[in-house]
Amino acid sequence: MPCLEDLALTVTDMDEVIREEELDRVEEGILCHAAKVKRFSFAIADSERPLSLPQNVWPSFTALEHLVLDNKAPVDRIIPSLPTRLLTFRLRSPFEDEAPSLKGLLDAMHSRPRALETLSDIILPIYTPSHSACDEEDELLSLCRDSRARDQGH
């Protein structure tokens, strides 16, 4: 697939343990195509545990512009390891009926990684926020405003 630019993967845990060799096969397949992929979506469905691709996969996305991650993904570790600048980032809604956590995204934004320097869109799931989620939303909005003000000042 020499022209593969879009890649979306959903791995189902279904309360079974995903074996290391299964994740290794997924990793191997992604690494074969990552350099060409411009739009990537990754989610692990039906899992109570926070699973992600191995950390060494993310630097391989050298053409990535649009990223969709699962609510439980370690966003704070993934985004700083991306070598490209994203145009859009989407935090996918949880499969379960629960509010998403914005903490990983907030932590990533605080570290000001290169991947977020050209970000034009952040897409968040719609949900009824708890009090702590409202605080996270307020902080995220403040970070976005500060970033925009810095960009306009240059």
Image (cartoon, rainbow, N blue to C red):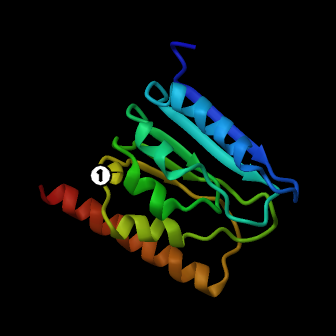
**Which quadrant of the rendered structure holds the C terminus?**
bottom left
Residue type at the position of mark 1: Arg
Whether residue 144 is situated above or below residue 121 in the rendered picture: below
- Quarter holding residue 36: top left
Q: Position of residue 18 (x, y in %)?
A: 78, 51
Instruction: Give the crowd class for mark 1: few <14, some 14-19, many >=20 residues within 10 Å.
Output: some
Q: Position of residue 130 (x, y in %)?
A: 67, 82
Most distant residue in the left direction: 154
Most distant residue in the top direction: 2
Q: Give the residue at mark 1.
A: 114
**Which quadrant of the rendered structure holds the N terminus?**
top right
Judging depth in this view, the residue of 25 and 129 nearest the camera is 25
* Disc 1 element: helix
Q: Residue at x 49, y 49 (%)?
A: 89
- Quarter holding residue 35: top left
Residue 104 is left or right of residue 117, and the answer is right
Judging depth in this view, the residue of 116 and 53 nearest the camera is 53
Most distant residue in the front direction: 21
Q: Position of residue 132 (x, y in %)?
A: 59, 85
Judging depth in this view, the residue of 54 and 86 nearest the camera is 54
Residue 132 is left or right of residue 93, and the answer is left
Q: Position of residue 55 (x, y in %)?
A: 50, 52
Q: Residue at x 49, y 28 (%)?
A: 37
Residue 111 is left or right of residue 101, and the answer is left
Q: Residue at x 73, y 66 (%)?
A: 49
Question: Number of marks in the image?
Answer: 1
